[in-house]
Image (cartoon, rainbow, N blue to C red):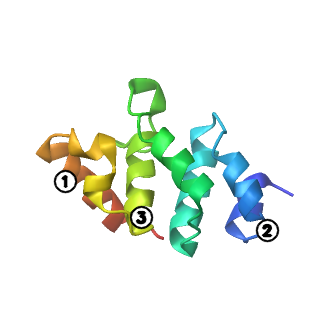
Amino acid sequence: MNLIKKIEEGQCSIDELQLLLNEANPIVLYHVMTYIGKEKLASIAINEKLEELTSRRGASDKLIGYYKVGDLAIATLIKLNKKTDEIAIFKSMDDFDKKMIFNLIEELEW
């Protein structure tokens, strides 16, 4: 079965999703993170991995348009009810980037 289809159809266990957060492929990461956000699948391990992914905001981490893997990780943490002042990288972002994160949350089909 196609991996992305498997994710979207809810055929992955929490452990599998957690492992998929280690993927290098931004398309897979996009589908894993949006699924985690949509289903509110928070766990200590998932939250730690998402927190780790928040630093992936470089040119090589491009997802869609302006957004990077790290931006989606931040948006997913916020979707999982993590407070913005608890997300280390979010606190150091400028107002424009913070606004873009909230735009991303609104634009996604969680």
Task: Please determine whether, in this image, residue 51 is positioned above or below residue 6.
Answer: above
Residue to which mark 2 is pinned: 11
**Residue for point 49% across, 40% down:** 53
Is residue 5 visible in the rendered image? The answer is: no
Residue to which mark 1 is pinned: 99
Check disc 3 and report its element: helix, strand or loop: loop
Query: How far apart in space, not on screen, are marks 3 and 1 (Cα)?
Result: 15 Å
Residue 94 in the image, given as x and y percentages of width and height: 15, 40
Residue 83 in the image, given as x and y percentages of width and height: 31, 62
Look at label 1 and name its amino acid.
Lys
Question: Upstream in the sequence, badge 3 or badge 1?
Answer: 1
Look at label 3 and name its amino acid.
Leu
Check disc 1 and report its element: helix, strand or loop: helix
Residue to which mark 3 is pinned: 108
Residue 86 in the image, given as x and y percentages of width and height: 32, 54
Q: Is residue 29 left or right of residue 18?
A: left
Is residue 37 visible in the rendered image? The answer is: yes
